[in-house]
């Protein structure tokens, strides 16, 4: 992946953005009949910059604001932004009193995502782990974390050709892969996946799997070598040394 303009965020933040955006601008949002270009533009996810920061009591704050210069030539008629508070421990949005001002995002730990990058991450994440998909019934308990979007760190990097590469990598803190030795293969297929997203048409062009293979069984190498070592032979006696006359 290209190093320039690369963006990295935790799985918890990416999942919080996905959950908040599903409320703010669902995938199936359509402009009404006779909509203007501006009306159509504001219903496109790439038109919205995203900021995220830690909230109170372990929550995550997500704010959407219209990207500068997007949709309106001389600026939007209103202050277009919306802030959500997400609790990823239960995967829910916290409801707030509409009469109260939205919470402020603290400067410490704040991350800004340009609209195209944020939209590419959301599209790739929806393909990688669809929100409506269920964990397979035969999944082993230790593998269940692999089917949670917050178990994957996200790296996104734009290319000059208008393509954004989005990579998902297992977060060892959220999903202990050392407990997955001898797994059914889920880790090998989901460990490191890269999506190429065309931000001009918002289509996924390609998906590549760059999995790191894990051993098939949790048998320490030292123990294996010990069991395969041949039996030691009896020591040879040294020849008698010549005695002086």
Image (tube, rainbow, N blue to C red):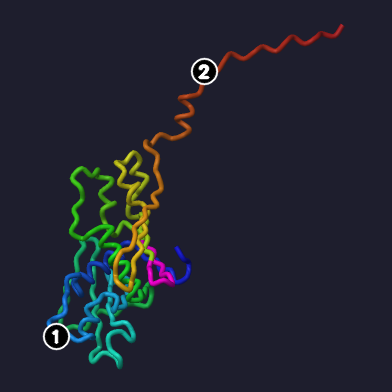
Q: Which residues are magenta?
A: 154-164
Against 179, residue 64 (above or below) is below
Q: Is residue 51 above or below residue 39?
A: above
The quadrant in which residue 24 appears is: bottom left
Read off the residue under disc 1.
34
Residue 181, can we see it? yes
SS state under label 1: loop
Q: Which mark is residue 231?
A: 2
Q: Is residue 199 left or right of residue 231?
A: left
Magenta residue check for 158? yes
Dominant SS in magenta = strand
Residue found at x 85% / y 9%: 244
Which quarter of the image is occupied by the N terminus? bottom left
Residue 185 colored magenta? no
Residue displayed at 20% across by 47% down: 136
Residue displayed at 24% across by 45% down = 141
For marks 1 and 2 on the same chain, the one whose residue lies earlier in the sequence: 1
């Amino acid at each position: 992946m290209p190093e320039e303009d690369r963006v990295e965020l935790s799985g918890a933040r990416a999942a919080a953005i996905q959950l908040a955006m599903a409320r703010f601008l669902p995938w199936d949002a359509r402009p009404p009949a006779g909509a203007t270009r501006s009306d159509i533009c504001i219903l496109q996810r790439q038109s919205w910059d995203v900021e995220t920061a830690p909230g109170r009591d372990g929550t995550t704050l997500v704010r959407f604001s219209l990207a500068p210069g997007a949709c309106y030539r001389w600026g939007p008629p209103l202050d277009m932004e919306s802030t959500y508070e997400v609790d990823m421990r239960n995967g829910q949005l916290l409801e707030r009193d509409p009469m109260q001002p939205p919470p402020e995002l603290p400067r410490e730990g704040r991350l800004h995502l340009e609209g195209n990058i944020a939209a590419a991450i959301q599209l790739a994440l929806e393909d990688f782990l669809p929100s409506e998909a269920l964990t397979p019934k035969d999944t082993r308990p230790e593998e269940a974390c692999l089917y949670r979007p917050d178990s994957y760190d996200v790296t996104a990097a734009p290319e000059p050709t208008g393509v954004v590469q989005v990579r998902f990598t297992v977060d060892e803190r959220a999903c202990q892969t050392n407990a997955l030795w001898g797994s059914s293969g889920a880790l090998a297929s989901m460990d490191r996946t890269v999506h190429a997203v065309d931000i001009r048409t918002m289509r996924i062009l390609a998906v590549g799997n760059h999995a790191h293979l894990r051993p098939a069984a949790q048998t320490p190498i030292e123990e294996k070598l010990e069991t395969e070592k041949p039996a030691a032979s009896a020591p040879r006696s040294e020849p008698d040394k010549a005695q002086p006359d």
